[in-house]
Image: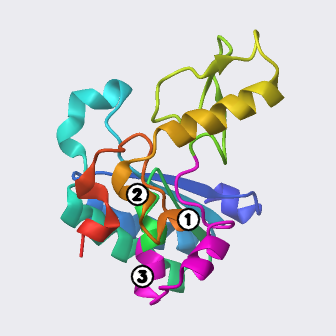
Amino acid sequence: MNCARVKLYLHFNIVATRVNLQEVVKVIDYGNQLGAFSFFIYRFVPIGRGEDVKQWELDHEQSLQLMQTVLGKQRTSRAFIIPVGFPEYWAYAAKERNIKSQRLTSSLGRYFGGCQAGRGMTYIKPDGDVWACPFLPTAVANIRKKSFPDIRGLLSRYRDSLSAPNCISCYLRPVCGGCKARPDDIASCFMKME
């Protein structure tokens, strides 16, 4: 409340799991009440210490529920609500808005490009290792050994190597592309959620 009172940028990170899925709406409503500027809604990906609680990962019906929640809240929230680690959301939003044109999804993909692994953000660890995504615990290169422009090229090739076969022909690929950390997770694919 103090941050909001003095007009500091107030941001919420929410990790949606089976344990707290019903609380996501309440947290967004509370943040809006406080005057939050933005929310990042993360879909729980069980890597690292998260492997110990793998059972918290959302199944496809819970993922669909989360997408419906986020879409509904984006329509009424004053703050930006951005799904993270959940590229299927943008395919869901396009489909809900009855967007069927490959040309339009290609255009929208410039702004809502789904999976950002190796594209939108780069993660540099304290030892200099560069990851394409925090959910892909694999070093693509090391900043101490290669220049950043060279690493950007490596990230792009690495990203392309991770595309799931079922994503390649999907007309929603430009706005989704599937999660590179879960390329074989058919249950998370929006097209399978209908």
Work out whether residue 27 or residue 137 is closer to the camera in this orientation and state it.
Answer: 137
Residue 119 location in percent, x, y?
Answer: 65, 45
Query: Percent x, y for residue 146?
Result: 77, 15
Q: Which disc number belongs to residue 174?
A: 1
12 shown above or below 28: above
Residue 165 in sight here: yes
Residue 96 counted in the magenta span: yes
Residues under labels 1 and 2: Cα distance? 10 Å
Q: Nearer the observer, disc 3 or disc 2?
A: 2
Amino acid marked by disc 1 = Pro
Q: Name the quadrant of the N terminus.
A: bottom right
- Residue depicted at 29% across the width and 51% down the height: 17
Residue 20 appears in the figure: no
Q: Which residue is mark 3?
A: 95
What segment is highlighted magenta in the picture?
A: 92-116
Q: Amino acid at mark 3?
A: Lys
Q: Quadrant of residue 86?
A: bottom left
Q: Is residue 13 left or right of residue 193?
A: right
Q: Which residue is mark 2?
A: 167
Q: Dot 3: few (<14), some (14–19), or many (≥20) neighbours within 10 Å?
A: some
| 159 lies above or below 25 | above
Residue 97 against residue 39 in the figure, above or below: below
Query: Image point 65% across, 18% down: which residue?
Result: 141
Q: Secondary structure at mark 1?
A: helix
Q: 183 or 55: which is nearer to us?
A: 183
